[in-house]
Image (cartoon, rainbow, N blue to C red):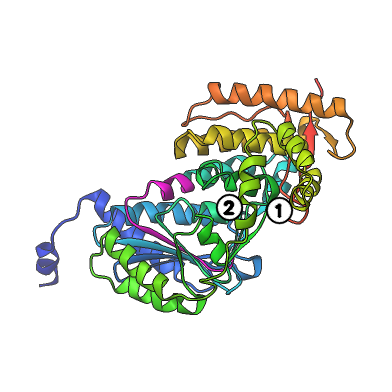
Amino acid sequence: MAVRALRALPRLKPFNRLQVILQHLKMSKHTDSTAEVLLEKRGGAGVITLNRPKALNAFNLSMIRQIYPQIKMWEQDPETFLIIIKGTGGKAFCAGGDIKAITEAGKVGGRLTQDFFREEYTLNNTIGTCKKPYVALIDGITMGGGVGLSVHGHFRVATEKTLFAMPETAIGGGYFLPRLSGKIGYYLALTGFRLKGRDVLKAGIATHFVESEKLPALEKDLIALKSPSTENIADLLNSYHAKSEDDQEKEFVLDKHMEKINSLFSANSMEEIVKKLKQDGSPFAIKQLETINKMSPTSLKITLRQLREGASMSLQDVLTMEYRMSQACMVSKQMGCLSLQPQRSSKSDRDYILYRLHKRLTIYRFSFSVSSFCVCKGVVSFSSSMSLYATQVMVRRE
């Protein structure tokens, strides 16, 4: 009888059967509350929960390798209608990538510096091209790589706790920052200025604003939607947004400076921007000069060029460019690099760095394909420093 019953079941094609088994294993494995990332199917929604609250939900390569295939699987699943991503702990959505591990790997020439950035940008592209509505609940700190996990999706819901910044000047943000109103994106990228709460919405980074305490209810309502379209999801988000009164009448933090930002940060080079800031001489301009002077000149120049070129490129092309930049800027000690502190290096040293980097980036842009990459022999490197917003420049003398 048991054999007859089994024979009566419809046979699955080998590939489909494997997909079902893998999905079952993944879902049972990653709903463990101790896992670094939780992947759950709840109702018609796939829910991704970044679960490293002690590390402010900073993500690592292992998490990327779990999230990416799950998004691809949900994208093909006819019973999954939207994807939700959030963080645990109440302090952060995601503070970025695990920079410490990447930096340590770079010092010894490990592959992590290649694999991490390549797979991170692949994930970002998957989010940006996802066929299913993608809702990021950016409650708390959202910085660096955490921005990449959210901003490329359909919907970004900010709260009064949201703290947005791109502290690792020169890597990341090349697609969405130059597309913000006026020159806000250039200003944020070159100064590392932090936006908080409703200002993240007013800057055009978030699509909606909802009080943090209402997010559980919003998530529950999203999950309860029956076969929702993108429009249905937008309507629900709009209804919550309309009821959120926190800081509703508050002026955008940059409103009174927008005229200066659009004028001062519209220059074609960092030298011109600095010149304009000095000529302006206002308290606002002086403050930006002080901030910029603490940063690596090389990093600032790369950032400006990245934004200017990214403004007219597709998301995939921008992410490809940023991957190449990340590899140009991660050089191990084993490659015989000379470490130079930007503040202490001479003008000729800096000129040499910029010349070599410009030459190498030009080669990168035209000699690489999306499907293949090559690690440079070591021209320039800078590592992110969230506290100082500065970079360490490393140059191989030839």
Circle number at residue 361: none
Between 105 and 54, the one nearer to me in the picture? 54
Residue 197 seen in the figure: yes
Q: How many circles with numbers are drawn on the protein?
A: 2
Q: Secondary structure at mark 2?
A: helix
Q: Which image quadrant is residue 289 in?
A: top right
Q: Is residue 21 above or below residue 392?
A: below
Q: Secondary structure at mark 1?
A: helix
15 sits left or right of 201 in the view: left
Q: Is residue 300 above or below residue 221?
A: above
Between 29 and 293, the one nearer to me in the picture? 293
**Few, some or many residues within 10 Å of mark 1 (<14, 14–19, 20+):** few
**Few, some or many residues within 10 Å of mark 2 (<14, 14–19, 20+):** many
What amino acid type is highlighted by mark number 1? Lys
Q: Which image quadrant is residue 109 in?
A: top right
Q: Horizontal and vertical percent for residue 323? A: 57, 37
User: Quarter holding the N terminus?
Assistant: bottom left
Circle number at residue 145: 2
Q: Is residue 271 magenta?
A: no
What amino acid type is highlighted by mark number 2? Gly
Q: Horizontal and vertical percent for residue 274? A: 75, 37
Circle number at residue 100: 1
173 sits left or right of 245 in the view: right
Q: Which image quadrant is residue 254 in?
A: bottom right
Q: What are the residue bounds of the magenta stretch?
A: 123-141
Q: Residue at x 37, y 76 (%)?
A: 220
